[in-house]
Amino acid sequence: MPNIPESGLVCVVDDDAMVRQSLCMLLETLGLACVTFPDCRTFLDASEMTQCECLILDVRMPGISGTVLQDILSERAAYLPIIFISGHGDIPLAVEAMRKGAVDFMQKPFNEQLLLDRVQKAIALCRERLAAERRQQVFDSRLAGLTPRERDVVDAILSGLPNKRIATQLNISIKTVEQHRGNAMHKLGARSLADLFILLGAAK
């Protein structure tokens, strides 16, 4: 799990040095930390990649293009929001980037205030995604802590079976079903059957 700085870190990948410099100066007006990279390979090799909360990415660059980097990050850092910038106005490229999960696609020159607004929204989205990922990891760990029989009972409950049917299906007593259900709910942090449905539904 990435170690995100409290102030927020924005990474800019663009082969134009003037664009990189101007974007960093703009972002720093919001009190955000900014690190720039001249190409995608440098970004991928940098430690800052794992701390980034918003990536501002040029579409067309020598070597690894912005769209190829997007594909790579979908495997390595799916939580990271990407704002594409382009001087080409390539509408099909923008549509494809958005379809793959980019949060925005802005054409150079862009409105500075609009960019700042979208960066702030991207940072908030990144933090939401990371929080959800942490919750999922905690829940997965709890789920793995269930005994096989407790998991059988939970699966049967989620299938809508009453305790009597579960007892018959698993060849155990109703009291044992209730005991396994109580143990499973305690381990999963569910205070009620409604909680259990919500937790397991969110985990699918």
Image (cartoon, rainbow, N blue to C red):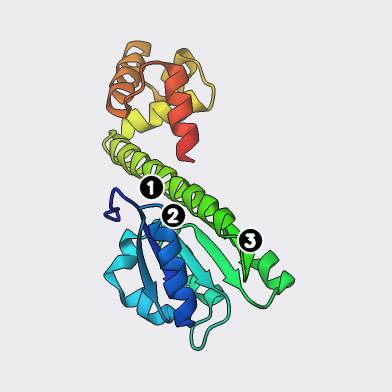
Q: Which mark sits nearer the N-terminus, 2 or 1? A: 2
What residue is shown at x 52% (from left), y 20% (from top)?
161
Write down the residue under mark 3. 98
What residue is shown at x 38% (from left), y 47% (from top)?
130
CB-based contact (under 8 Å), mark 2 and mark 1? yes
- Relative depth, front residue between 126 and 149: 126
Q: Amino acid at mark 2?
A: Tyr
Write down the residue under mark 1. 130
Instruction: Check disc 1 and report its element: helix, strand or loop.
Output: helix
CB-based contact (under 8 Å), mark 3 and mark 2? no
For label 2, count other residues whose C-alpha is less than 10 Å away and answer few (under 14), some (14-19) or many (20+): some
* Image quadrant where one finds the N terminus: bottom left
- Relative depth, front residue between 56 and 80: 56
Quarter of the view holding residue 58: bottom right
Write down the residue under mark 2. 79
- Relative depth, front residue between 30 and 81: 30
Q: Position of residue 74 (x, y in %)?
A: 48, 64
Quarter of the view holding residue 101: bottom right
What residue is shown at x 36% (from left), y 60% (from top)?
52
- Relative depth, front residue between 160 and 121: 121
Q: Is residue 53 above or below residue 23?
A: above
Q: Amino acid at mark 3?
A: Met
What residue is shown at x 31% (from left), y 59% (from top)?
51
Q: CA distance from mark 1 to mark 3?
A: 20 Å
CB-based contact (under 8 Å), mark 1 and mark 3? no
Q: Position of residue 136 (x, y in %)?
A: 38, 41
Instruction: Check disc 3 and report its element: helix, strand or loop.
Output: helix
Q: Which mark sits nearer the N-terminus, 3 or 2? A: 2
Q: Position of residue 104 (x, y in %)?
A: 60, 59
Query: Can residue 75 be seen in this snapshot?
Result: no
